[in-house]
Image: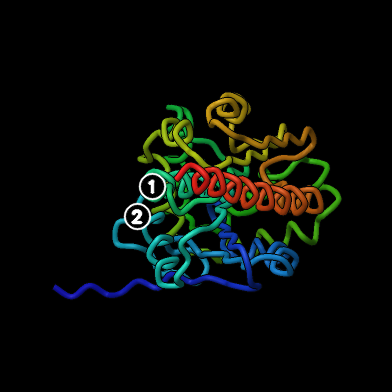
Amino acid sequence: MYHKIKKVAYQEAGQGECLVLLHGFCEDSTMWADYLSVLSKKYRVIAIDLSGFGRSDLLDVPSIEAMSEAVFGLLIQLHIRKFVLVGHSMGGYVGLSFARNHASMLQGLGLFHSHPFVDSAEKIKNRRKTIRFIQRHGIAPFAGQFVRNLFAPSFVKDNETFMEELIYKTSMQHVDAVIAASVAMIERQDCSTVLAQLDCPTLFIVGCQDNAIHINNSLKQLSIPPVASVHIFEDAGHMAMFEKKTESLQIIDEFIDFCVAMEQSLNAVQSENQ
Ligand code: MLT
């Protein structure tokens, strides 16, 4: 049987310790443009388009695990064996799945408005409603309300042009990718144990006005991993990478430094004990 090789698109800049950035639902790697240009002054930064989003092909079975295996395949191809992964929301679900199968490659795992738990019954109902709506009407009539709802109301009010641009970009994503990602999120596995067993540091960035991730899920995960760096923005929604850009850039930069320093000291202790 003939299997078409699937394209996994990515953007890359910089040299040094490696940072991999994964976008969330209905987004693509271009959301990280400012992160790529700032952080690439210090690190090798790779921002990946997940299955069917941006310029990547839709995977045959686009589960969260298949998405994380596509990320793995790309990184192997790029000869990257150690890196810090930061995933936004659905990108965090993919990051956790990556950690389940390839934990030894992670120097650190950042969950940017994300969490390890499965969907509630209500969330599944809403996702099914979204799927039916998009099947009938396409993405454009869904994009406006969806995008605005991701941000704190004050940010929406003060950034109308930016909102319009993001809504336009969202409406250009492929219907098949959006539906497949919704199904993948409904079917994803709980990753609490993965988080509990991580031996690299975890980063949490939480927005108290996040309408996409329930605050209970955001908070109840914080004490699960052995080593965590926690940042809570009272006045951010689900998009602190835009709503709190300067702070988020600094948080990620400091997190990478911390992960690298921790790995170096663990390696030093291990070689002393040999
Ligand atoms: C995302 O931004 O990736 C989604 O809001 C995640 C979700 O719906 O669980």
Which quarter shows the N terminus?
bottom left
Task: Bin the neighbour count of mark 1 within 10 Å (Cα to Cα): few under 14, some 14-19, many 20 and up.
Answer: some
Quickly name the residue at label 1: 184
Q: Nearer the viewer, residue 244 or 252?
A: 252
Front disc: 2 or 1: 2
- Give the amino acid at mark 1: Ala
Quickly name the residue at label 2: 66
Q: State the residue at coordinates (69%, 52%).
A: 257
The verdict on label 1 being within 8 Å of ligand 1 is no
Q: State the residue at coordinates (62%, 48%).
A: 259
Q: Nearer the viewer, residue 79 or 70?
A: 79
Q: Nearer the viewer, residue 68 or 18?
A: 18
Q: Nearer the viewer, residue 263 or 49?
A: 263
Label pair 2/1, CB-CB below 8 angstroms: yes
Above or below, 172 against 214 in this view is below
Which quarter shows the C terminus?
top left
- Give the amino acid at mark 2: Ala
Q: State the residue at coordinates (38%, 47%).
A: 184
Q: Is residue 125 visible?
A: no
Q: Is residue 88 visible?
A: yes
